[in-house]
């Protein structure tokens, strides 16, 4: 099941809702959205109303209370950043105000001279949890989506910690939707900038897999429905400039597309 969050109707009085993507018989791609009554957590109830997919604006598929990100979780990326793979997951937070959706623009901050893309698999938490055992981690997962952990690399180097570099508004694109029926163990992930492949890997190369990350993070902090864990980026990160189009594609989910603009 693919869950979207979207707006529809006249721009001055637009309605906002969650929905389930619907693929009509014989169609290869979704054509409409079945509107969910309320939120998608727990048992999903549909309103019995559908709207054409072409007539809506897709929003971030979730608005998390927090985004917990994992640094250096692919060995090749850890080495390209000048270090060895860490023994334990490296945690940092991105503010909820950094979240944007598919098609939204990434604002290049005036404080930075080097902004990098980082394509990642994102885990969306489905229920409040803490101290989750590895063997029960799947029980608290709502689904998966694509993410771009946008980073002001020069500020990351100069600050010595990552909050400012990772925390600018628009620095956490998520989408285009949440896939609820997916095995994250071995998915192809790639990032393209202006059509050129820059990152290409598989999630089987994660140093710490999804279940281990959920257990690790939930032993530090309580996770709430809709919270997001970014699982880390593969090797190949690099800078973008104003006007660049970034596409993060994950097998079984889809493609998240955003363009860089001047702030």
Image: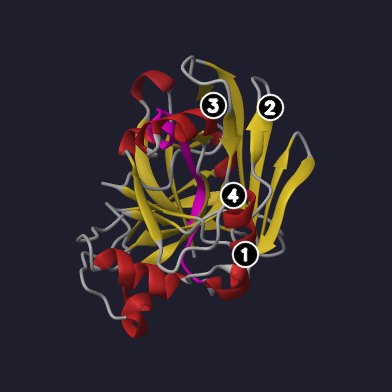
Q: Is residue 58 above or below residue 249?
A: above
Distance, label 4 to label 2, CA atoms, is 26 Å
**Residue most toward the right?**
196
Does residue 170 show up magenta in the picture? Answer: yes
Q: Which residue is mark 3?
A: 105
| Element carrying mark 3 | strand
Left or right: residue 30 versus residue 95 is: right
Say which mark, if any, is on residue 244. 2
15, 70: nearer the viewer: 70
| Element carrying mark 4 | loop
Does residue 20 show up magenta in the picture? Answer: no
User: Which picture quadrant has residue 5?
Assistant: top left
Q: Earlier in the sequence, mark 4 or mark 3?
A: 4
Report x, y in % for residue 124: 39, 59
Distance, label 2 to label 3, CA atoms, is 10 Å
Looking at the image, which residue is at 50% across and 36% down?
151
| Element carrying mark 1 | loop
Report x, y in % for residue 188: 68, 64
| Residue 119 in sight in this render | yes
Q: Nearer the viewer, mark 2 or mark 3?
A: 2
Circles 2 and 1 in contact, beta carbons < 8 Å: no
User: Which picture quadrant has residue 252?
Assistant: bottom right
Q: Which residue is mark 4?
A: 82
Left or right: residue 252 versus residue 218 is: right
Q: Which residue is mark 1?
A: 252
Looking at the image, which residue is at 51% across and 47% down?
175
Q: Which range is magenta? A: 165-181
């Amino acid at each position: 099941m693919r869950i979207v969050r979207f707006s529809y109707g006249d721009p001055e009085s637009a309605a906002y809702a969650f929905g389930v993507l619907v693929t009509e018989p014989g169609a290869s791609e979704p054509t409409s959205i079945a509107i969910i009554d309320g939120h998608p957590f727990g048992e999903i109830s549909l309103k019995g109303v559908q709207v054409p997919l072409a007539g809506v604006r897709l929003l971030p598929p979730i608005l998390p209370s927090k985004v917990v990100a994992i640094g250096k979780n692919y060995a090749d990326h850890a080495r390209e950043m000048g270090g060895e793979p860490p023994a334990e997951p490296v945690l940092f937070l991105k503010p909820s105000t950094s979240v944007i959706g598919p098609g939204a623009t990434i604002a290049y901050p005036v404080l930075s001279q080097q902004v990098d893309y980082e394509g990642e698999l994102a885990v969306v938490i489905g229920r409040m949890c803490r101290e989750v055992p590895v063997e029960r981690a799947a029980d608290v997962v709502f689904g998966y989506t694509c993410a771009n952990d946008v980073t002001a690399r020069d500020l990351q180097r100069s600050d010595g910690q990552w909050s400012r570099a990772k925390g600018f508004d628009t620095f956490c694109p998520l989408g285009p939707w949440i896939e609820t029926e997916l095995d994250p163990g071995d998915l192809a992930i790639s990032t393209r900038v202006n059509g050129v492949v820059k990152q290409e890997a598989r999630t089987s190369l994660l140093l710490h897999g999804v279940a281990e990350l959920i257990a690790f993070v939930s032993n530090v902090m309580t996770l709430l429905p809709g919270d997001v864990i970014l699982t880390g980026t593969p090797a190949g990160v690099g800078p973008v400039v104003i006007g660049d189009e970034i596409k993060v594609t994950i097998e079984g989910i889809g493609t998240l597309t955003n363009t860089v603009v001047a702030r």
